[in-house]
Amino acid sequence: MGIGAVSDELLGTFVPIAVYWLYSGLYIALDGVGRFDGYRLHTREEAATKNVVSKAAVVRGVLVQQAFQVAVSLTLFAVIGDESGTGQKQPPALVIVLQFITAMVVMDTWQYFMHRYMHINKFLYKHIHSKHHTLVVPYSFGALYNHPLEGLILDTIGGALSFLVSGMTPRTSIFFFSFATIKTVDDHCGLWLPGNILQALFSNNSAYHDIHHQLYGNKYNFSQPFFVTWDKILGTYMPYSIEQRKGGGVESRPAKLV
């Protein structure tokens, strides 16, 4: 069962990818508007000098990861699929809400501990996770720029576990993974925009994540993509404030260096 002639499984696989590039494209458009420079967490000069990987290489890296996601998603749906072809019936709205919450908790838990371990283990950090940290100044379409193995472990397996544990249907997964994609892109957008509802509702946002991408925050703020719960429970949360930067713009400034 699906929308028109396209199955929910195919939509659940490809819609989040389309959302990634469309939402990133919105931030690319904003980046070209000079008046938004006042909301940048880093200057354009910092982005040009601190990021040691080209944007073309970032695009290629993200496309490789998304190819892995497509392969795993289609395999997963093929294994658990309903051979009758009628599709799963959508549960009541309250059940869907609970499935969303469960999936968010599962994804946050998996990604926190896997992400943290990739920082603790020097071999994994040097050879795998450091690729993501070549973006010292994060930007929207670099959100999924990772080593392919990291992308498989953190994002693809994390997403599969969230789907399976929550028990959501393929149709619900379209919306859940699209939302998770929007959230991930937003966390890497590099802007602190007034009126951004995601930044207002979630403590895990672009400023929080920017702290993690700086040298002083390398061992803090591991949570992604929704909450900061595990950081606060396990003492890896670095508090910060949003301050006006000398010369214009804003910055996420750690409240204390620990």
Image (cartoon, rainbow, N blue to C red):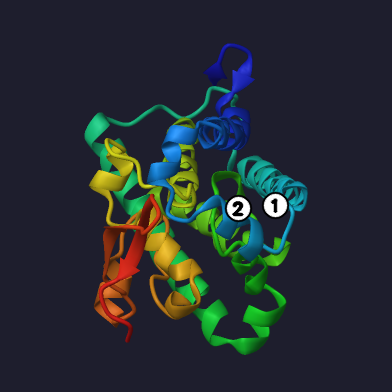
Q: Which residue is mark 1?
A: 65
Q: How far apart are the alpha carbons under marks 1 and 2? A: 7 Å
Q: Which residue is mark 2?
A: 144
The 10 Å Cα crowd at callout 2, few under 14, some 14 to 19, many 20 or more, is many
Q: Can residue 134 be seen in the rendering of this structure?
A: yes
Instruction: Label 2: state its secondary structure.
Output: loop
Q: Quadrant of residue 70?
A: top right
For residue 138, above or below residue 229? above
From the viewer's perspective, is 255 left or right of 120? Answer: left
> Is there a contact, CB below 8 Å, between mark 1 and mark 2?
yes
Q: Residue at x 55, y 37 (%)?
A: 24
Instruction: Label 1: state its secondary structure.
Output: helix
For residue 123, above or below residue 175? below
Q: Three-letter amino acid code at disc 1?
A: Gln
Q: Quadrant of residue 245?
A: bottom left
Of residues 36 and 171, the one nearer the viewer is: 36
Of residues 192 and 93, the one nearer the viewer is: 192
The picture places residue 217, in percent across and down from the top left corner, at 43, 76
From the viewer's perspective, is 212 left or right of 21? Answer: left
Of residues 42 and 117, the one nearer the viewer is: 42
